[in-house]
Image (cartoon, rainbow, N blue to C red):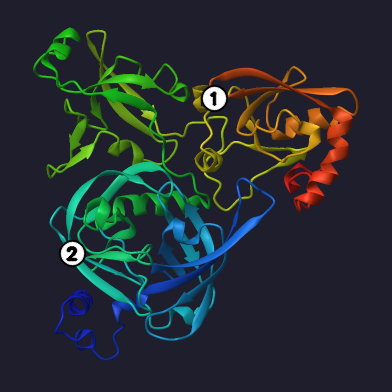
Amino acid sequence: MRTMVAGLVAAAMPGFAQEAAVQDGEINPLNAVVKLEVTTAKPDICCPWANRTSGGTGSGAVIDRGLILTCAHCVTDSCYIRVRKHNEDTLYHGSVKFVDNDADLALVGVDDPAFMEGIEPMEIGETPHVQDDVLAVGYPLGGEDISYTRGIVSRIEDISYSHGWTYLLGIQVDAAINPGNSGGPVLDMRSGKIAGIAFQGLGKEEGEALGFIIPSDIIRHFLVDIRDGRVDGFPDLLFSEDQMESPAKRRYYKMDSGRTGVIVQDVASVLGTDSIRTDDIILEVDGYKVSNNGRIRLKGGEPRSLYYPLYVRQIGEKIPVKVYRDGAVVETSITAMKKNPPIRGWMYDEKPDYFVYGGFVFTTISLDYMVQSDAKFHDDLFRDKEFDHEEAVVISFCFADKCIEGYIGCDKSLVRSVNGVKVRNLRHLVELVDSCRDGFVCFGLDRGNEWDIKVIVDAKEMRESTARVMKRNLIPSDRSEDLCVN
């Protein structure tokens, strides 16, 4: 390990030769840092029958035989992955084995046995402390060869992960994190082990070129999660809370001076009534005392949010919680789980469904659609599903055609019903529409603040115009493959 650390220091410090720190016959530890060249084919959410092809680069660290740890956003929607090693010019081909979009982490596999020649897998270390020295290694844009930037840990706290739109533990470092660095290891200079994975940064206009890494706590959660061969991801935040720093507020809730905590404002229905409740005051989470400002302290005194003990647990695990309820201390628990709303999550590595009917294009609402379209919907889309397979359907696009004259501005509208029947999901909508051969079809729509809009079309006209609309707009099929009748 000393030789490994000496090699890292030599690589990071000007005036020292990296090769001098690695003795004859020993493997350079930085050979485990590889470059990923990725071609992607991402479906167009607004035109779901079409793909947009592009390419990019990222970095990765070999952590086991033929397995590369990298960022999910580096390989999302990938159709071709090339892997280049630091210590040779041979080109290898990789494939995605596991992806956790919540944590922006992925494992890429290389099957060629020759790939591991000259590579010693890197170890996952511990999450570093503030002011610890770290070394970011990777392949940022602006050059072809491996790059090293040294820095210190500036801050450790929950941050927004831009890929998964999750809120998890992140580490701010002053080492430069640039495009292409993503997925590369950030090494603890004391141990030589992986302290985190570089994954996002802020430009100078946003904060003096701040860089962020995914800490080893989150990486370890991902690696434990995939042991059963599937990715469950991270638990959702299932409640909201408010601080209890106001003396008047503490007196109102009869909190004596020996107790601290935060008050629960809202609870997701998936937790049930046997867990925490609105107006409970959370005193402890997993044995950690909760302060009045909503933080806990680790054994060494480092602060974390009260959600930290929750999101480091695997889906299905129970976390003990102590609350103050109706003047008494109650011991209960929270089950780590995900919410189950009737809208799909991020459409990573999957094709959106669609159905063309006359000039209307219907699709299932996803987070991608909501962001790209900037559509506004009612809050009930974020409640838990009322029944299995419930999914919200939207008119995503309107093609100008005489069959929908007067309704061309109905895109971004939620479809509540067809001929008075509540729509359960897109497949159900297709079944309802296909059964209407003659007469009229009445769609019940909601759009932002407009409720129960009636859109009435002629069934025969719509059916006959579909082929015309498809030909004019180069649409290969009136429905996605998953909606075709077997």
For the point 53% across and 78% down, the residue is 112
Which is closer to the viewer, label 2 or label 1?
1
Left or right? Give the position of 466 relative to 106.
Answer: right
Expressed as whole percent of the image width and height from the top left, the position of residue 175 reads: 22, 63
- Residue 371 is tagged as none
Depth check: give the residue in front, 219 or 53.
53
The quarter in which the C terminus is drawn is top right
The quarter in which the N terminus is drawn is bottom left
Disc 1 target residue: 448
The total of numbered circles placed on residues is: 2
Depth check: give the residue in front, 151 or 473.
473
Where residue 238 sits, quadrant-wise, is top left
Disc 2 target residue: 151
The span from disc 2 to disc 1 (Cα, nearest Å) is: 48 Å
Left or right? Give the position of 396 relative to 218.
Answer: right
For the point 35% across and 80% down, the residue is 145
Q: Amino acid at mark 2?
A: Gly
Above or below, comparing residue 392 to residue 72 in the picture: above
Which badge, 2 or 1, is on the more N-terminal residue? 2
Q: Is residue 391 something that shows in the picture?
A: no
Find numbered disc 1 in the image and state the secondary structure of the residue it sits on. Answer: loop
Instruction: Farthest residue to the bottom: give it.
Output: 24
